[in-house]
Image (cartoon, grey):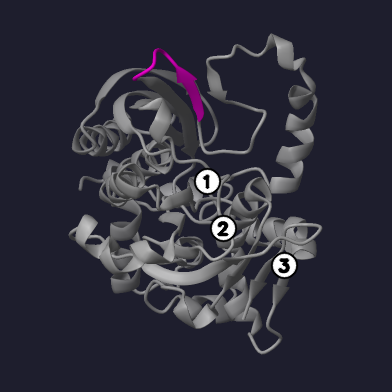
Amino acid sequence: MNTDQQIRLTSLASCAGCAAKMGPQDLARVLHPLKQQDSAAIPPNLLIGLNAIDDAAVYRVNEQQAIISTADFFPPVVDDPYTFGAIAAANALSDVYAMGGQVLMAINLVAWPDDLPAALLSEILRGGTEIVARAGGAIAGGHTIIDNEPKYGLSVTGIVHPQHILTKGGARPGDLLVLSKPLGAGLITTAHKRDIVASDDLYAATQSMMRLNRAASEALVKAQKASGAVHAATDITGFGLLGHSWEMAAQSQVNMRFSYSDLPLLPNVLHYAQQGAIPGGAQRNKTHLAPHVSIDERLSEAERALLWDPQTSGGLLAAIDPALWPELATLAPGVTFWRIGEVTAPTTQSTLEVY
C-alpha cells in the first residue's frame, strides 16, 4: 500500500462502526407521510413497497419474474479501501438475498472529498466490483458527488420468482429462528476506530462482513420451494438483531424468544463491549425498541449491548418449520446456521424475549 493509501479512512467518517444509519424511530417518522398515499395509486404489480416493512422493493414483470430493487451506502467502517468497498457491496447485495433473489446488476453510489487521493477510491470500487462479480452480477454504472465525508455503496437490481419471494411477514408460532452469521460487527468496528481492537479480531469481523449471503439465501429458497418450510426471512443490519427481529415479529403478528447462550458471536466481542466500544446506533435501537423487548435481568450491560448492536453486512435471520432444521445444513454446504430462538403465539402487541 502506498503512502496515499495509508490515510485512515475511518477517521474521516462521523459514525464509523454504526454505518451512519438513521435510527428506527426517526426513520418511521420520516416515512409516515409516504405511507399515507392512496392505495388505489399503487400499481398492482408493485408487490412489495412502502405498504409493508421489508428489505427491498419488488415489482412483478410477468408471471415468472419480479424485479428486486434496493440501495445502501455508508461511510468507511475499516481503513483498508479495498476491504471497505467489498464490505459495502456485500451489505448492499444482502437485501436481494433476504428476499430470496439473485443479483443482476448494481450501480455504484459514491460521495468523495475532493482532497482525498483518487487511488483510494479506485481501490474501494475494485473491492465492490469483485464482490458483485462473485454474486454473479455486474457493475453497470454509477453516480459520484463531492462530499466532506467518503461514502460508498450500491443501488442493486435483482430478480426473483413472484411465487418464491422471502418476506419478513409469515413467521408462525412454533417456528425455529435461525441465523447465518455471528453478531458483533458494530462493536468490533467501533473498537477499531478507537484503536483497541486486536488484529485477529478485526480480521474475523471483516471476513464475516465480506461474505455474501448468497449460499444461505439459496438454501432457504430451495427449502421454501420444496416444502414451504421457510416462512419468513430478513437480513440483520443497522437495526441490530432485535430491531430486525421485531420488524419480522410485527409483520407476522407473533412474538419471539431468543436464547442468549445460543447466539453466535464474533471473537472477543464482549470484551470490546466491556471496554465501552459501543456504536451510537446501538443506543438509538435500544431507545426505539425497549418497550417491545424483555431481557433477562441476569444479562450484563455488555451482553445487552450486543443485542442492540447495529450490524454491517450481517447474516440472514429466518423463521423455519422445525422439520427443516435437521436437513438445513445439507442444503447449504459451507454455510453455518445457528438455531437461536423460536416464534411464539401472538399477544395484543408483538414482543421479543431474550432469556
Whole-number angstrom distance, CA of label 3 to CA of label 1: 31 Å
Vertical relation: 111 (above or below) 262: above
Vertical relation: 70 (above or below) 87: above
The question of residue 23 being in magenta is answered with no
Question: For the residues carrying marks 3 and 1, which lies nearer the camera in this image?
Answer: 3
Q: Is residue 152 visible?
A: yes
Q: Is residue 209 left or right of residue 26?
A: left
Q: Which amino acid type is shown beneath numbered disc 2? A: Gly
Element class at badge 2:
helix
Q: Which residue is mark 1?
A: 13
Q: Which amino acid type is shown beneath numbered disc 1? A: Ala
Number of residues whose C-alpha sits closer than 10 Å to that of mark 1, classed few (under 14), some (14–19) or many (20 or more)? many
Q: State which region is magenta.
A: 57-64
Whole-number angstrom distance, CA of label 1 to CA of label 2: 20 Å
Element class at badge 1:
loop
Cβ atoms under marks 3 and 1 closer than 8 Å: no
> 252 or 354, which is in the foreground?
252
Residue 74 percent location from the top left of the image: 50, 40
Residue 41 percent location from the top left of the image: 70, 9
